[in-house]
Amino acid sequence: MEFYKHTACVTFDELTAGPQPIIRPDTLRQNLRRGNIQCARQGGGEGHYALYVFHSLPAKYRTAFVQRYGNPEELLRERLTDDSLLQEDTEARAFYEDFKYCLNGVQTHLSQQLIDEYTRNAAVIRLLLRRQATLLATSNALGNGRRSDLWDILLALSEKLRLHTPHTLPHNLARLREKLSQFRTQGYASLISGKLGNANTLKITPEAGERLIALKRSRTPVLTDAQIFQQFNLEADQRGWKPLRSIRSLKQWLDSPAVIQLWNDAVYGELATHQHFDRRHRTELPTLRDALWYGDGTKLNLYYRDDEGKVRTTSVYEVIDAATETFIGFHIADTEDYEAQYHAFRMAIQVSGHKPYEIVVDNQGGHRKLQSQHFFDRICRVHRTTAPYNGASKTIESVFGRFQQQVLHQDWRFTGQNVTAKKLSSRPNTEFIEANKDKLYTLPQLKEAYLKARTRWNEMQHPATGEQRIKMYLSSQNPETPAVTPADMVEMFWVTAERMSTFTSSGIEITVKGRKRAYEVMASPGVPDFEWRRTHTYQKFVVKYDPYDFSSIRLYSRDKAGQLRFERVAEPYIVVHRALQDQAEGEAAFIRQQQEQARQSRIDRQAQARAIELSQGVAPEQNGLRTPALKAAGADTDRQILRRLQKYSLPPEELSPGPRTKQLSLTDWTELNPQPADIDLRRVAEKL
C-alpha cells in the first residue's frame, strides 16, 4: 500500500500475487481497459511501478484486500486528517531561490538542498497554523474557550507529517511554539539559519576584499597566492580583520566569478580578460553564395628553401566564400600588403564572375590603403572590418585551422599550426625537416603545391551538406549579386597612380614597384599624335593602369571641382636605337619621319605665332627689326613659314567696279583654286 497525491493506492503485486490472488492479472487488465479501475501512476523504469486507486476497485476486491492487508484509507486518515492535506508553498520556494547571503565576501544563493528544506518547513508551518486556526474556531463555537490540548495536537500533527515529509522543525514543543511565533512576525526569513550570512562569521569583509584584490593586481612587486596570504594576515591584525585560515580558501575566493574579473586583466592582460568574460554573439552563416566574402592573410604553413638553401616560410592572402567555405582567390607574398590583397580579390572576382554583396576584412594597413582608394566600394555593396584582436569573430580563422589540419598537415613540410597550439601533432618535426631540407620545395614548387592543396580543399565535402564545396559554389546563384562586365573590371581593378604625372616632350612616365614606364598618345598604331601634343604637352594628368597589363594606360584631366574627365589612352613610348648597326628594319624611316614631323610642327607653331604678331602690329618687321631665322632648320624652313604668311601681306580688297573688273580679268584659274577642278569641257566649248 502507498499514498500517491494523498490518495490510497495499491500495487499490481498486492492484487495479483499468491496462489489465490485478489484479482487475476487478465481480469485486472480488462477492468483497466473498461475504466472500472483507475490507474493513479503508470509503471516504467526501475523502482517506478504502477499504482491503482483503492476506492476505484469493485467492492468484492476491496473487501478481499482489506481482509488480507488492512484498510489503506483508514491508514491515510490516521496520518493526515481531511483538513490537513499538505501542499507545497510556491511562494516560499520562490523566496528561497531568490535569497542571497554573503559567503566569504561573495553574494551567494542558497544550495538546492537548503531551498528544498526551507520550502518543506514553510509548508508544514502553514499547515500547522491552519490546523491551529480550525481548532480554535471549533472550541470557540462550542463555548469551551482555549483548549488545553491545542499544542499537543499540533506537535503530534508535526510528528505525523515528518513520516512522509521529512521536515526539520523542532521536536520540542517549546521550540516549535517559538518557531511558529517567529514565522508569524518575520515570515519566510525566520526559517533561514542564523549561521548563513552572519557578520560575525564572515571571513572577508568588503574592505578586506579590496585589499586582497589590490595585492593580486600588484605589479611592483608581483605576488604569488602564498605571498598574498602571508601579506594579508600580517596586515589583518593591524586593521582589525579576521586572518585567513588557508591558502585554499583564498584561492577559492579570488577565483569566484564575481572577483576574478577584478584582477584577471592585471595578471593575464585586458584583451585576454575581454575575450574570456565578455559576451559573444551567436551567428548563423549565410545561405547564399557571394553573400559574404572573408579576406585575411596567414602564414603559408609549408617550409621551402630559398636560392641559398636556407629554410624559409612565406605568407598567403586568401578570400573565401562564407556560405560554402570555398577558397576563391589567393596571392602568395612575404607580406600582407595592399598588393597581395588586390591580387587575391581580383582573382576572386574572376573566379566568381559576380560582385559580392558584403566583404569583411581585418584592420591591416593594406586594407586601409585600398579603402582610401575606394577599392572595396567598387567591388561590393557593403564593406566592414572585424573587431580587432578577435579571432573568434572571423569565420575564416576556423576555415584556416581546419584546412591546416585536414590538408596541409599531410605534407611532411608542414610548419605546424599556431605556436599557441598545445597538441604535439600541431607542431612540426623540425629534426626530420632539417635532415631533409635539400628535398624541400623551391618557391615555384611551393606555389604549385599550395594550389593543389587548396584545390583539394575545395573538392572536399562541406561538413553541413556533404556536397563538394566547389560544386556547391558553382551550382548555386545569388540574385542580389550582379554579374561582372568588362567595364566593371576596368572600374574595379584599374589602379589610380598616387601622384599626377606631367606629359612632357618625352611622353608621360609612371613608376610602379620602382620601375619607370613611359607612354605617349598615338594618332594611329605606331604614329605619335603631334596634333594632340601641340595642345597638351606639359599638362598634368591623373593616370590609371592595369597591374596585370601595362600595354596601355588611361589619362584623365581633373577639373576645378575635382572630377576626373577622360582624355586619351596612351601606349608605350616608341624606342629606337641610336647606332645604325643596332637599328631594325623600318627604324631609320621612322626616325626621318619623326624628324620631318618635328620640323613641320615648328613651322606650324611659328606660322601661327607670327600671323598673330602681324595682325596685331607687333611683328619685328613692322617696327624696323628682323625676326631671327630658325636654328638648325635650314633656309627651306624659313621659306615655308613666309609662304604661310603671304595671305597677310596681300593688297587690300578692291571694291570699286572698274578696278575690280580689271583685277578679275587678270586672275588665273590656279589662283582661285590650286587643286585641279572638274570642268565640263563640252559646255565650255559651246560657249566659245
Image: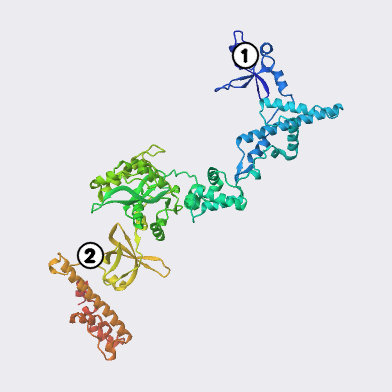
Count neighbours of disc 1 (C-alpha within 10 A) and say few if under 14, some if 14 to 19, many if 20 or more.
Answer: many
Residue underneath mark 1: 15
Q: Is residue 641 left or right of residue 288?
A: left
* SS at mark 2 in the image: loop
Would you identify the image quadrant in which residue 436 lies?
A: top left
Image coords of residue 169 (percent x, y): 70, 32
Residue that protrudes farthest toward the right in the picture: 143
Q: Nearer the viewer, residue 9 or 626?
A: 9
Would you identify the image quadrant in which residue 160 lies?
A: top right
Vertical arrangement, residue 196 with respect to residue 641, above or below: above
Residue underneath mark 2: 526
Image coords of residue 12 (percent x, y): 60, 16
CB under 8 Å between callouts 1 and 2? Answer: no
Image coords of residue 79 (percent x, y): 71, 22
Image coords of residue 344 (percent x, y): 34, 52
Q: Is residue 167 left or right of residue 558?
A: right
Q: Amino acid at mark 2?
A: Gly
Q: Nearer the viewer, residue 544 or 85?
A: 85
Earlier in the chain: of badge 1 and badge 2, it is 1
Residue that protrudes farthest toward the left in the picture: 581
Q: Give the residue displayed 27% in from the left and 65% down from the top.
A: 516
Q: Amino acid at mark 1?
A: Leu
Count neighbours of disc 2 (C-alpha within 10 A) and say few if under 14, some if 14 to 19, many if 20 or more.
Answer: few
Q: Give the residue displayed 26% in from the left and 77% down from the top.
A: 604
Q: Is residue 177 left or right of residue 520?
A: right
Position of the C terminus by quadrant: bottom left
